[in-house]
Image (tube, rainbow, N blue to C red):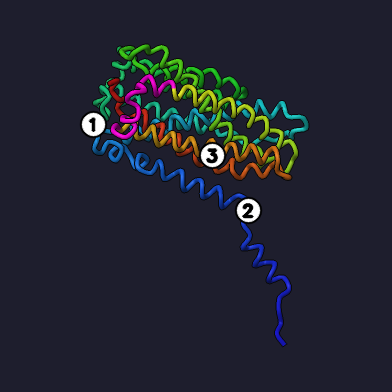
Amino acid sequence: MTLTNPGAGRTGAHRGARRPGTGRATAVLVLVALGALIPLLGPSPALHGTGEADAPGTGGIALLRTVLFAALSIPVGELFVRRLARSVPGAPGTLPRSWSTVANSAGFVAALALASVVATGNLVPGSPADVDVGGLYDSRDGKLALLEVNGFLAAALCAASARPATQVWPLAAIVVAEALRAHPTTEYSPMIGSGLTLVHLTCASLWVGGLVYALRTLKVWQRAEAGAALLGRYARVAAALLAALTATGVCSSLRRMPPETILAQLTETAYGRVLLAKVILMVGVAALALWARIRLARAADPLSASSPARAEVYLLALVVAVSGLLTALPVPIRW
């Protein structure tokens, strides 16, 4: 007589089971990430065949900018979602541990390293003796770099204090400094460009950091009904953020690449290639966001929307990396 384990079939089925939506989310991630593969390898592939020079330290600057943008998003998103969570009826009193102090500290290190580059005439310093700290006060870029360094330091201290909400002010100063830095006074209508970047960077930080903290909150709240309510409130705001990001991104691109040249520059300049990769990634992010919103509204379990939302976070991380690379590449010429 053959002895069988009555639970073996169920165990095998359980092991082979796949969380609903996981396969499709993975497919979206793989397919869309292919669109950003070349520029994510660094500036050299993006510059290949364009005739543009690869400035020294471009890869390192792109990495530092990526860290800076990510460090800005985390505390901004936490402040945003904590405010949303307080307005959810019946929400549990527990919230995830804050990452703001660590994020602001990382931002401080990245901003300090970027300031050292500015202090050596936008060249990578070979030794500490090459850094002219006093020279930072003599230029607009230097003063803005110092403002970002001091802003992250102040934000880290505020985050570690008894009133972490006060970090909103130094974080706002960092966003303003970054918007001004991205558009020098020699640029065509620099204040318009700075205004577009200000809105774009603010919305991006709220979206990226907010989604990360919202998903962390859902994990802490377990299956509480308040979790679906929080995700729904975030999704409504995220829709407006996406609209603002799209509008400001298109306007900024048209300012730097006029309509009659944009198709050529998207393939023949490093800036255009990386911008195209960012657009492809953003299309994927928007698709995942829409998928999560549909699940939230129509699925029997609204919290199943967290599956595409997690995939959205991974794609947004790639978007942040592409954005960091984009800021380190030469701006295309207005033909």
Provide the secondary structure element on which disc 3 rests: helix
- Residue at image x 42%, y 16%? 194
Q: Quickly name the residue at label 2.
A: 19
On screen, 285 above or below 246? below
- Residue at image x 68%, y 33%? 232
Quadrant showing the N terminus: bottom right
Q: Earlier in the sequence, mark 1 or mark 2?
A: 2
Q: Quadrant of residue 276?
A: top left
How far is mark 1 from mark 2, CA to CA?
Answer: 47 Å
Q: Quickly name the residue at label 3.
A: 313
Quadrant showing the C terminus: top left
Is residue 278 covered in magenta? no
Residue 237 horizontal/vertical position (percent) = 62, 27
Q: Which mark is residue 75?
A: none
Q: Answer few, some or many: residues within 10 Å of disc 3's Cα (few below 14, many 20 plus, some between 14 and 19).
A: many
The magenta segment: 251-269
Residue 4 horizontal/vertical position (percent) = 71, 79
Which of 153/312 is in front? 312
Foreground: disc 3 or disc 1? 1
User: In the rendered structure, are the residues bearing label 2 and label 3 in contact, judged by CB atoms less than 8 Å apart?
Assistant: no
Q: Amino acid at mark 2?
A: Arg
Image side of residue 103 versus residue 306, left or right: left
How far is mark 2 from mark 3, CA to CA?
Answer: 18 Å
Residue 311 horizontal/vertical position (percent) = 55, 43
Q: Earlier in the sequence, mark 2 or mark 3?
A: 2
Image side of residue 286 versus residue 41, left or right: right
Which of 187/163 is in front? 187
Residue 68 horizontal/vertical position (percent) = 43, 30
